[in-house]
Amino acid sequence: MEAFLREVQEVVKRYPQKRAAILPALYLAEQRFGWLSQEAYEAVAEALNMPKATVKGVATFYSMYRKAPMGRNLIQLCTNVACMVMGAETLLQLLERRYGLRPGGTTEDGRFSLVVMECIGACDRAPAMLVNKDFHPNLNENNIIEILEGYS
Amino acid sequence: MIRLTIDGIEVELEEPVTVLEAARKVGIKIPTLCWFEGLPPFGGCRLCLVKVEKLPKLQTACTLMSADGMVVETENPEIRAARRAMLEFLLINHPLDCPYCDKAGECELQDLVAKYGPEAGRFAEGKRRHPESFDDPIIVRNMERCVLCTRCVRVCEDLQGAYAITVTGRGAHSFVEPFSGGRYDCEYCGNCLTVCPVGAIMSRLHLHSYRPWFVQKEAETVCSYCGVGCRMVVQVRENSIIRTIPRFGLGVNDGLLCVRGRFGYDYIEQKERLRTAFIRKDGELRPVSIEEAIEYTAKKLLQIKDTNGPETIGAIASGRCSNEDNYMLQRLMRFFIGSNNIDSSARLYYIPIVQYLERIFGQGVTANLMPGIGRSDGVVVVGGDPTRINPVLGLQIRACHRNGGKVVVFGPSGGLKRFVPYELRPRDDEALLVAVLKALIEKKGMPGENKNLEERLKEIEVETHDVLREASIEEPLFDTLVGDLLGLQNPVVVVGPEVLQAERPSRVLFLVAGIVYLLGARVFVMSDRPNYQGLMDMGCLPDMLPGERPIELETFRHKVESVMGRPVPDKAGMNLFQMLEMAKEGNLKALYVMGDNLYYHMPDAEEALQSIDFLVVQDIFMTETAERADVVLPAAGWTEKEGTFTNLERRLQRFEKSRTPLGCMEDWRLLAELMAHMGDERPPRTVAEIWDELVQVSPLHIGINPREIGPEGMIYPYHGEPLRGVEGEFDVEALKGPYGGGPEGLRLILDRPLYHSGSQSRRSRALRSLQDSPVLCLSPEDARDLGLEDADMVRVTSSKGMLKVKVAISEDVASGTARLSNTFSEVHFSRLVGIRQDPVTTGGVFTDNLVKIEKLPSEGSEEVME
Ligand code: SF4
Ligand code: SF4
Ligand code: SF4
Ligand code: FES
Ligand code: FES
C-alpha cells in the first residue's frame, strides 16, 4: 500500500490537480491488485483524496480497465481479419489445449487471462498479441508457447 | 439589463439566468426531467428543448443562458416531436411496470409520456435487465426504471456532500449504485429518493404499501429528532404514517432531511407505545384509567406539598416535548405546587452554553439564521460533530465550503473530513484554543466593544510556544490556521456539547467566546433535542420565568402574578443536579418527569430515583425511568398533537396534528387535567388558550398568534438579529493558566451518533436496521495499541462498572478517547461513568470515565454490572 501510494504520488506530480491523475492511477492499481477490485478503488480514492464511488464511476466508464479478477498476466490476442487469416484461430485452439485457456477466461493457477482483441494495429506482422504491456508479433504455434513460458 | 422574448412574452432580466429560469419567471413551465432546482444543471435528458430564433438546432433551456434579444419558443410541433422522440428513447429500456411501481401517480416520466407520447414504442429488442436490489435495509433500487437523469448523484454530491453513489458503466448500460454495489453504507439521508423522478430509488419502509392517491391526510410538521427543526410533511392513511417528505423551498432544511427525520418516524407507531396509565400498587405497576391516575397524582402531590412543603417537589421538563407541554409543566410547578424546582436534561450542556454566552454577549446571541452558515466565508467548529448531532446544520457547513469558505474543526473533522483543508487534532483542545485566541488578540487587536470581556481577555498570559507544545500542534500548521482565521470577514462559530467535557468547562467556553468575539462571528449552539431552546423560553428553568426573565426581578414577578392571579414563588429553585442531590439526601419527596428517560441518561440517577417517595413519569414509552415510577401517564407523541417547537436558531415553528392519539393524551392536556384537580378553575384546554396566556406572561412572545406562524416559522423576537451589548457578569476559572496537561489514559466520552438519538431511536425499526447494537468507537491509534481490530469484542471497565461491547474503529474519534452512545438498553454510557456539576457554567461533566479496555474472545454483548 505504501509503495502504491508513492507510485501514485509520482504520477500526480505531472498533473495540475490530484484528481486529474485518476486514469493513470487506475492503471497503477490494476497492476498492483491484478484487477480493479473494490480494494483497488479504495486505494486510488485514498491516494487521490477522492470519493471512492466517484473513482468507481470513472473506472467503469472505460472499457479497457480490468473490472473482473484477472490472472497475473493478461494475453490480448488479436483475432480480427488479418490475424485470423494468418492463423490466430489455431493459436486460440492451442492456448485452450495447452493451458485450458478460453477467451475471457483465466487459468486455474491464476497465471494467464485471455482476451481476444479487435485489431491491435499490427496487421503487417499478424498474428499478434500483447502480453501485459509487451507486444509480440509474427506468432506461430512454436514461438507463442516459448513467449508465454517466459511469464510466470 | 437583458431583454428576451419567450412565447411572445417580453422578459426583462437584471442578472443573466438560464432560459428555463427566465421562462419560469413569467410563468411559462418548460418540461424538464434531469433539471432540479438547487442542483447544477446537467443537460442530459433533452426534454427542455426549445427553439431559439437564428439557432439552427433545438436548444436545452436548462443549460442555455439567456442573452439580450433572444426570441424563444417553448412549444410547437417540432419541439413536441423532439420531446416525444426523447421519451421514446427512454422507454426503450424503461420497464413500464407502472401497475407495480410505487411511483405511479407521481412519476415525472409517466406524466411526461402522458403529455407528449409516444403511445407505443417501435423498439422490438429486449430491455436491459437489472433485478430490483433489496441488499439495503431501507433503500430499494430498481435500476430498470432509472432514466439516468443523475439527479440522485448530484444531490448526494452537491447538496448532501456524501459522494456515496455514482453512475457506473457507460451509455445505455449505465446505472446508479452505491460504492458497494449492494448496501448503501452512506449517510442515509434519503435525499436521493426525494429527487428521483421515477421509481428507481425508493424507501423500503413503505414499499408496496401505498399509492400516492391513498394519502388521506397531509400535515405540516417539524422533525422530532434534533434542534435543527427540519420541516416536513407527514402523509397519513387510516391514522398511520405512510411516509414523511420534505419540500424544497421551505424551512431551514429547504427540501433536505437527514436519516433520522426521513426514516426514523416509525418509532411513534411501535406497539410498545403506552396506551394506558399505571399506578403502582403493592410494588407493581397496574393499569388504570387516565382519570384515575390523574386524580391520584393530584391528591398525592397536594398531600406532599402540605406535609413537606412545595420545595420538596420537583419537575423535569423535556426537550422532546412542545413549547405548550413545557409551558404547562412550569405552570403546574410554579402556580399549583408553588416551587421553582424545574429543570431538564438541557442542563447537561445546552442551557449552560447558551446562558454563558448570553452573559458575555447579551440575550439572544445564538439567534442566528442557519442559511447564513452556507453564505458565510468561514466556519469554526468546536465541541462535537455537527454532521451527526445536527445533520442538516452540518450540510450548511458543507455548503460554506462549496461556496469557497474555509472550514476549521477543532478535533477530528468527522463528517466534515472532505471539507477541511487540514485536520487539527490537538492533544489538548484547550491549549490550542488559548494559543489561537492569543494570536488573534495580537494580530487583530481588541475591538473595544465589550469592556467586560476584554478585561478578562487581557488576563491571559501564555507563551504560544509552550501551549502549542502542550497541544502538540506544529508551528507551521498553527500559522496557517491563524492566517486562515484572520482572513475571515463574516465567519460563524458552531459550538457543541463536548466543550464542557473538560476539567474547567468555563475556561474552554470562555476561550471559545473570546474567539467568537475577536472574529466578530455569529454563534450557533448544537442541540440534540428538538426543543431545548423552547423549554428555556417557556420558563422550564429554576431561576427564570417564561420569556427567560430572572425570578429575582420583582417587577416581572408582579406582572406574572397579576396575569395568573396566583403568587410566583420568589426563591430560585433547584436545578437538575441539585434535585438529584436532594433526592439522595431524602429531601426530594416527589418528582414529576415529563418525556425524559432520566434514569437512563443520567449517571448515578438510580439511587436518587429510589429515594423519591412519589415519582410520576409522563411518557410515550415504558422507559427505564417509567418502570421505576409510582404513576405512569401515557402521553401523545409527535404527529398526535399540534403545537410548536423552537429550534436552535430560535425559530418558532408550528406543527399540525395528523393522527388521533390512542389511549393517551397530549402532555399539556394531562397537565391541564391535573391542574384542574389541584384548584385551577379554568386551565387552558386548547393550544390556542395556552398561547392566550403565554403571550401575557412571556415578554418574549408578545403579540404572537401561533395560528399565524407560517411554514417558514417565526424568528422572534430577534428576527435573526441578536440583541448584543447587554453584557452581564460571568466567571471563568484559572484563566491565567497553566494550560494543557490534561488527564492521561483512555477516557470514555458520550457519543451522539448519526443513526440514533438517545433512547427514542431504539424504538425505530428503520434506524435499528442501520445500527442494531451498541459499538465502542476507538481511534485507529488506540485500537492499534490495544491490539484490536474492527468488530472485536472487548470488556470495558471503569471504576463504576464493566460491560462487554463490540469495537468500531473510526478516524472520527480523537485518540485518547473511546465513544459510546446512550441508545440501547443492554449497554449504555451512563452506567459506566459518573457526573459532576461544574459550579461556574452549571453544566454536567462526566467523571470516573478513565477506562480499561481488554479484548474478549467471544461473540454477543451483554452487560455485567458490579
Ligand atoms: S441516502 Fe443520502 S447519502 Fe445515501 S446515497 Fe442517497 S443522497 Fe447519498
Ligand atoms: S436513480 Fe432516479 S434520480 Fe438517479 S439517475 Fe436514475 S432516474 Fe435519475
Ligand atoms: S437534521 Fe435534525 S431536524 Fe433535520 S431531519 Fe435530521 S434530526 Fe430531524
Ligand atoms: S487484425 Fe490483428 S492486428 Fe489488425
Ligand atoms: S431538463 Fe434540460 S436537459 Fe434535462
Image (spheres, rainbow, N blue to C red):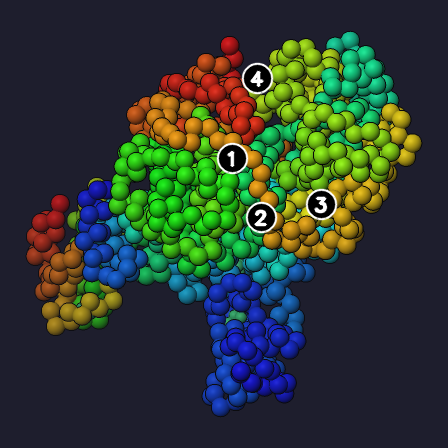
Residue B86 x, y percent position in the rendering: 53, 74
- Tell which tag, 4 or 3, sits nearer the viewer: 3
Mark 2 residue crowding within 10 angstroms, few (<14) / some (14–19) / many (20+): some
Q: Specify the quadrant of the image occupied by residue B780.
A: top left
Which residue is disc 1 drawn over? B497
Marks 4/2: CA distance? 39 Å
Which residue is disc 2 drawn over? B724
Marks 3/2: CA distance? 16 Å
Q: Nearer the viewer, residue B300 or A90?
A: B300
> In percent of the image, x 44 and y 65: which residue is there?
B172
Q: Residue furthest bottom?
A: B54
Question: Which one is earlier in the sequence, the residue at label 4 or at label 3?
Answer: 4
Chain for numbered disc 3: B
Q: Nearer the viewer, residue B184 or B608?
A: B608
Res B700 label: 3
Report the amino acid beneath label 4. Asp
Chain for numbered disc 2: B
Report the amino acid beneath label 1. Pro
Which element is circle 4 on? loop
Question: Which one is earlier in the sequence, the residue at label 3 or at label 2?
Answer: 3
Which residue is disc 4 drawn over? B604
Which element is circle 3 on? helix
Residue B553 x, y percent position in the rendering: 72, 34
Question: Which one is earlier in the sequence, the residue at label 2 or at label 1?
Answer: 1
Q: Is mark 4 within 8 Å of ligand 3?
A: no
Which element is circle 1 on? helix
- Tell which tag, 2 or 1, sits nearer the viewer: 2
Residue A53 x, y percent position in the rendering: 39, 51
